[in-house]
Amino acid sequence: MYYNGVYHLFYQYNPYSAKWGNISWAHSISYNLIDWIHLDHAINPSDPFDINGCWSGSATLLPGHDQIKKPVILYTGANSLNQQVQNLATPKNLSDPFLTEWVKSSNNPLMTPTNGLDPKNYRDPTTAWRASDDTWRVLIGSRIDGHGAAVLYKSKDFIKWERTKTPLHASNKTGMWECPDFYPVGVDGEKNGLDTSDNGVGVRHVLKASFNDHDYYVIGSYDSKTDGFSVDVDFMDERVRLRYDYGVFYASKTFYDGAKKRRVLWGWVLEADSESDDVGRGWSGLQSIPRSILLDKNRKQLIQWPIKELNKLRGKKVTVGNKEIKSGEIFQVSGITASQADVEVSFRLPNLEGVELINSDSLVDPRLLCSQMNASANGVFGPFGLLVLASEDLTEKTAVFFRIFKSDGKYVVLMCSDQSRSSLKTHVKEAFFGSFLDVDLNQEISLRTLVCSL
């Protein structure tokens, strides 16, 4: 959340251990999204409506007196019966520039799992938006009759909420929807983000849901008068599901940065080693690099890029140009700190005659294809990319690379991350990640890789 010149990051946190449990809302602030100050916890389990945990939620800026907005938080509480309910918290003192203390509403819980909703699958309220009827709307992630759903509630005063007859959207083959997100994006190359309540001509909407260990999204048209949401491609079609990220990235949330007129995306990066490793280092899980997010010109997908403030962390610049790399060749870039680097590489490909052919049946699962044709398997056009955090003898390395194939007369670009040799530890998860890319092979293929080893 951005409020009065300060960025606020709220996140789930166990104040007593690096293990799961005692879930509270931690609170950190920043002036630039890069340098952060940790404050006291914003919300702790203390009341019957959240005694078993203060789970995910979102912040919303409400209109106040003299055009001064008032931030509020909607969050999920696990009550004394371990049922999930939705609660409200507000700042104790709006004149405090850091919003250090938060007070829970005496009206809590505001929303409860009634009329057939599963009390164990009813959580993670979104940032609310207000339509032209001056009515607030918010989504709750749920599962109804085995289908993932974004349950819609409406309110005039942000206290009394009524559930609509039907969800904003629901889909089978998805399971429980966690941490839903719903926001507008501009069309026709609009380079600015939009406030969550913006709507009208030239605006489309994104609905994101977290399920099956990934963050999927759909793009569609939202009618605020009927609360109808018509999507281009649904979650049900597993072959063409859109994802924010094809690596370790989950339970993400966007917010509108009014100062720079952009929408910023955060995500949760889980650990790949053991719980004992978490305890040893004293923390578990990371926040992803914040990204600016926009609708692509083709209106079919979103595009993302690390926020510009990240350039502040850059140090010595090393440039290598006009380098020809032959198949199977490895070229070492010297003069940089390999554990912390921001690497931009552009590849221009030669004539693609003789490119490998691949059966269309192999194009169903890019992750599987990356594992079958890993970084050690040389092809005609690929792998080409980067070996990151590599040891001198290359027994330890993380490969980020491309491959090019041809299927049914069309070129196919596969991007992979091979983490099968990222560590010599035996208990670390070995993983492959992959995605097919829609790129113009007549142009340069650019790869930006951010490296940070803690």
Image (cartoon, helix red, strand yellow):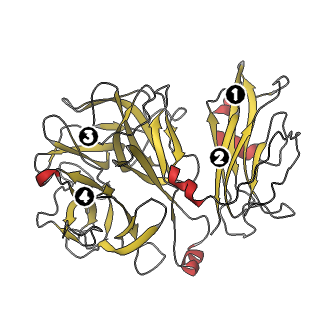
**Residue for badge 2:** 448
Residue 204 or residue 7, whichever sits in front: 7
Seen in the image, is 232 located left or right of residue 136? Answer: right
User: Label 3 near label 2: C-beta < 8 Å?
Assistant: no
Residue corresponding to mark 1 = 443
Q: How many marks?
A: 4
**x and y percentages locating residue 97 in the rendered image:** 27, 67
Q: Nearer the viewer, mark 2 or mark 4?
A: 2
Q: Earlier in the sequence, mark 2 or mark 4?
A: 4
Determine the residue located farthest toward the front in the rendered image.
316
Instruction: Give how far apart the Cα atoms at labels 1 and 2 are.
Output: 16 Å
- Kind of residue indicated by mark 3: Ser
**What distance separates the C-alpha of mark 1 from that of mark 4?**
46 Å
Asked whether disc 2 touches disc 4, contact meaning CB atoms under 8 Å apart, the reply is no
Label drawn at residue 227? none
**Secondary element at image label 3:** loop
Left or right? Give the position of 221 relative to 372: left
Say which amino acid is labelled 2: Arg
Q: Earlier in the sequence, mark 4 or mark 3?
A: 4
Q: Amino acid at mark 4?
A: Leu
Q: Tell me the quarter of the image containing the C terminus.
A: bottom right
